[in-house]
Amino acid sequence: MAPSLEHYEDATSGIPVKVLGTQIDGTNAAATLQLEEADKHDQVLRVFRCLIADLCEQFKGGHPGGAMGMAAIGVSLWKYAMKYSPSNPDYFNRDRFVLSNGHTCLFQYTFMHLVGYKNMTIEQLKSYHSDRTDSICPGHPEIEHEGIEVTTGPLGQGVANAVGMAMATKHLAATYNKPNYELVNNMTFCMIGDACLQEGVALEAVSLAGHWKLNNLALVYDNNQITCDGSVDITCNDDINEKMRACGWNVIDVMDGTTNIQGVVQALVAARASDKPTFINIRTIIGIGSASAGDAKAHGAAFGAEDVANIKRTFGMNPEEHFVVPDAVYDFFREAKSRGEEYEKEWTTLVDGYSKEYPELAEEFKLRVAGKMPKDWTKIIPEKGSFPTTPTASRKSSGFICNPLAQNLNNFMVGTADLTPSVNMTWKGKVDFQNPELKTACGINGNYSGRYIHWGIREHAMASISNGMAAFNKGTILPVTSSFFMFYIYAAPGIRMGALQGLQQIHIATHDSIGTGEDGPTHQPIALASLYRSMPNLLYIRPCDSEETAGAYIAAIKATSTPSIISLSRQNLPQYPENSSREGVQKGAYVLMEQEDADVTLIGIGAEMFCAVETKKLLEAEHGIKARVVSFPCQRLFEQQSKEYKQSVLRYRSNAPRVVIEAYAINGWERYADAGYSMATFGKSLPGAKAYEHFGFDAKAIAPKVKALVEEVKKEGIDSLRGDFRDLNGTMGYGFEH
Amino acid sequence: MAPSLEHYEDATSGIPVKVLGTQIDGTNAAATLQLEEADKHDQVLRVFRCLIADLCEQFKGGHPGGAMGMAAIGVSLWKYAMKYSPSNPDYFNRDRFVLSNGHTCLFQYTFMHLVGYKNMTIEQLKSYHSDRTDSICPGHPEIEHEGIEVTTGPLGQGVANAVGMAMATKHLAATYNKPNYELVNNMTFCMIGDACLQEGVALEAVSLAGHWKLNNLALVYDNNQITCDGSVDITCNDDINEKMRACGWNVIDVMDGTTNIQGVVQALVAARASDKPTFINIRTIIGIGSASAGDAKAHGAAFGAEDVANIKRTFGMNPEEHFVVPDAVYDFFREAKSRGEEYEKEWTTLVDGYSKEYPELAEEFKLRVAGKMPKDWTKIIPEKGSFPTTPTASRKSSGFICNPLAQNLNNFMVGTADLTPSVNMTWKGKVDFQNPELKTACGINGNYSGRYIHWGIREHAMASISNGMAAFNKGTILPVTSSFFMFYIYAAPGIRMGALQGLQQIHIATHDSIGTGEDGPTHQPIALASLYRSMPNLLYIRPCDSEETAGAYIAAIKATSTPSIISLSRQNLPQYPENSSREGVQKGAYVLMEQEDADVTLIGIGAEMFCAVETKKLLEAEHGIKARVVSFPCQRLFEQQSKEYKQSVLRYRSNAPRVVIEAYAINGWERYADAGYSMATFGKSLPGAKAYEHFGFDAKAIAPKVKALVEEVKKEGIDSLRGDFRDLNGTMGYGFEH
């Protein structure tokens, strides 16, 4: 049960508090630890705050106020409450720390420096906001750098990431821990500011964390009541504690978080012992010690030389000296390193013992710690011959491929944003990821070892929490999400953060065209593929049949530092077993139907491949025009290919024009074609086949347009099209009268 | 004060309740109205539910369960609680109804039919899910059709839209109402399902509505505890009533919403009298009467002929008959029409009296009701000569233009997602839109007549609430939002819904390039412009200096059925007073610097125009290469131009290659150029100028690449480039090793 720990601010300073010792089992083996004397705390806080002011002042920029306000929280975390190892930042069972208010990154960088992360030198600290391209102190924390768990900055994301990390811990613990062998039991601490509690993605994630009872998660709220525009109450008057309680959280107040390290430590310790996720509401003063303390001005600008000098006088430091860290401050944190090495050692010993008692499980566990896929995963992908040759929705094809993968590979954590009946992501014997105590009205229950996740109708949190699961330890968990493609527009900020961080994930996006039908234009994506095709480090793959869907999964699984979106149809699609090729998909594009003396190349994609193939037939049968067909499921994969290969597919400088056919906005296809047959407007609520017909995605409508183009080229020469891309199905219009 | 109205379910049926009479001042002039007898209610509910089952069964699709469950809520709204006029659905002071759970659209369509919306015939009802292209009953409600306030479907959006409508009412009331003249005092009722309460955008909007004390808003929660995946408790165990109370809402429970019309009416009436926004938590049974009542199966599929027959037997209807509406049911609703006409008449009389007492205000009010801009708005836009010729950030240029517009035009409602110090959107004498009773810690207060909106850190709600303000009455309010461009990725689902609905808005997106600097890759947009450039009915305008920024505002204000994003720099930009042109911006692209015998055309855009201009100079000075420069602020505007104009700008089939330079992903520019100089990866945390240099956006780096291209063309002929777009600054890569 959660201790009743509200209003710890009243605790008398200096009283011994229980904090976690070096034991792996934190909750049972808490040791009594005497906090350091108040004057030592005082010195650390003074030095830290002046250092932050100096670091922002040198290049006249950055975010000093939050970091200064949070100093006592930092001491509580890095000196007392967190288990981590500066010598080996990737030590597997470390507590995870996420800075959701990423603009206060100097807070984290500076504590990392003080506790001895080896790359985080004082010179590196000084590179903050400099023009050094080798800085490990960018304006927001970046996962590439040692000791940073996750890249943050876009507000609210860190909260969701932290929920994902806490899920990973719960899941791995439920899967591998055994009596006396708590291989995985780390906490996740997530710092948040006022803004994080306003962003929808965080509110979605908060609701899920409460639902799942992730008691290994603490949100540490730097409640300074200041945002850029002024005091928080100009935009928010939520009773935040009641709101968190209503979402199933344990709430602890700390009324003075600016100096009361004792109170903060007690709250952090209580969080580890809670039976629910814990929200620690800590009042601080932004920019404490500066002239703009408690004011929005302290948020995002340096204080100016004069005020920095004043800050130093206020804190008893010499205003003439800069970047001063007395040895006593380093000494204060010195034990962090040895303590961390001790954690590691104990964990290694634990794993050794486990390996003897549970050799098979240990082997699997070690493989996952190493982030490796089982070598024979490719064998799980069904052979081409096993797929139906009758028309099949590619969402169904996806099920043929993903379900056995998910069934057999323990690193797959698969879920859906409330579309289980539509996306075909379940498998025989699947167990849901749930709080084991949960008893639902519909009788669908589960436990933490479950690998099927009901995300609810929370697409954004689904993506951003998945980032956290993937970032927990590279390769240990492969999150697979699913929803309608259109609703990946809600998830876009999270998907982007996954791509930016190189976090492998597979997003299964069904109902990906106007063929989704009666649901109408709100559900029919037109522009969204343009975003994902242009997003760096993301594979947007749109397969045309079951075989290509297999290829899409193979490409996505091989891309170990890249998220993929596999874009699938609701409606049945013709199959091309004689022509389609999983190997072709790996190359991004390939010739589906060759024709050596072709008059035109038709480029078909995904659910609209039928248009290219039917048009080819019609052109040949009725118009005497020979066409070849290229299948083009993924632009980014194609861009990786050799010039020769590209030439063989696209025939640059040939006299036969290339026409791309896709029921999306054309933007971006102009690179690969001379003309396009695309959507110039939003869609329409009609049965799928009728919607295609209504917008002209129909060989009878397409063939005459292609014929006219071919005839123009025969008459005027191919130069007639040069630099003058042709829209054969309407141009980019407003869509509305003005 | 809000009446204490919890658990009205215990009220005895048949007792007279106070509902609003025909008076415009609803709260003071409530009349006593006897509800109809229970047996009449019973018949209406039975007939309605069987009709819904029939409508879904005919084409074996659609969403019957929710609509059937909500029948009693519908009777309460359309028969008793809502003020509206079927003869004139656009009657200005009508109560607004938003169906956030838009998939239950048959609920709304069918009640509109029963109360006499003239276009909503029984034949139209039967067109639901048919292949009729002239259906006004699409799979989700669409604003184009009579009586539909807003297009819904993507979940959560409707909640935000409703908040925007309630804001519009509050604002217009505070601006124009006078004692005895409540010109605007309508309620907004928003139906929501379980899903809407999970989506982040709704949670953001809920927090704002509570903050603003929008007591003219009621969320009517169809609490059937079922989503696609099963019972809601598999993904959500929030105490929703407590959560809403913590956000400042009045909460009313109705425990039996399936039959207890009395209870629902009382709750709806209480909502109108509340001093806070009201959350009415109504328990219903999805698919009531069917074999899958209370089950997820009732959500999104027809019941099958057998079960439909059973439903009819259960409800005492003839299973052999379909689409049956007895005259008694039409009679039951008949008075809706005359009552609506009475509302209109009284309102017209009120406006007449107002026009005599307050002739000037009345003139302005009528202009706004007509949705017209004051004719002389163009005169407010500063002349070119008034802008500084020294380097100026375009976010600052935007302030020069927008601030006087906002100061002088009462239809401008301007706001920011907590970036007041960064986006330059305030004006002298601005008043904040706030609850007048609010007293904030920082002393920034306001009232409902205010036109500056602090959105907090809620970009998604900002866009989606703005849709609601714009949809309140076309042209009455012109919402202007602002944030960093990168964070319009959070807002994308809302922006898209604005474009789909033809709702004019201006989104001011600052910090739009890698020049945003130290904040790093999380804040530097690379792919986002591709989304907005390809989105139908949206203008993404990226001006290069103050004069072009003026042009961008003119284009955005003229586009009365189209949202615009004006994309601006954080950093100072050189000004081109001799060359740049607001008229040019209206055409999307124009020749900034002509050169008749040019060897190359350089296309510059927005903040990177300096690259094109400096490269031109360097090519001429050091390489003997002549270059012309095209400025290309908006692709969609350019696509509206004549072929001749396009030819004059882009010189199709010329022998001089065209090179586009922009620090974004290149996707989509291939249409207008032969080669591109762009970003192939995410950005980097560096000072702005250094970031440009690091990624090669620098004439010294660009000129040699352009020179090589020009030389290749001179040697090999322009045909060498045909269909083979050249990336001069790196190709679309993964960005990560695999």
Image (cartoon, coloured by chain):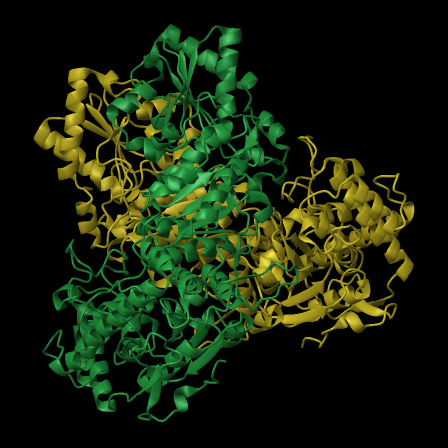
Chain colours: A yellow, B green
B429 vs A253, nearest the viewer = B429
In the figure, is residue B364 to the left or right of B47? right
Name the spot of residue A653 as percent of width and height, x first: 30, 17
Name the spot of residue B641 as percent of width and height, x first: 28, 29
Give the number of marks.
Answer: 0
Name the spot of residue B133 as percent of width and height, x first: 16, 53
Q: Is residue A568 visible?
A: no
- Give above or below for A199 relative to A717: below
- Give above or below for A486 relative to B100: above
B723 vs A296, nearest the viewer = A296
Name the spot of residue A255 as percent of width and height, x first: 74, 68
Q: Is residue B198 visible?
A: yes
A373 vs B694, nearest the viewer = B694
In the figure, is residue B589 to the left or right of A274? left
Name the residue: 35% across, 67% down.
Answer: B183
What is the quadrant of residue B532 in the picture?
Answer: top left
Name the residue: 67% across, 46% down.
Answer: A300
What is the quadrant of residue B169 in the picture?
Answer: bottom left
B394 vs A162, nearest the viewer = B394
In the figure, is residue A721 to the left or right of A562? left
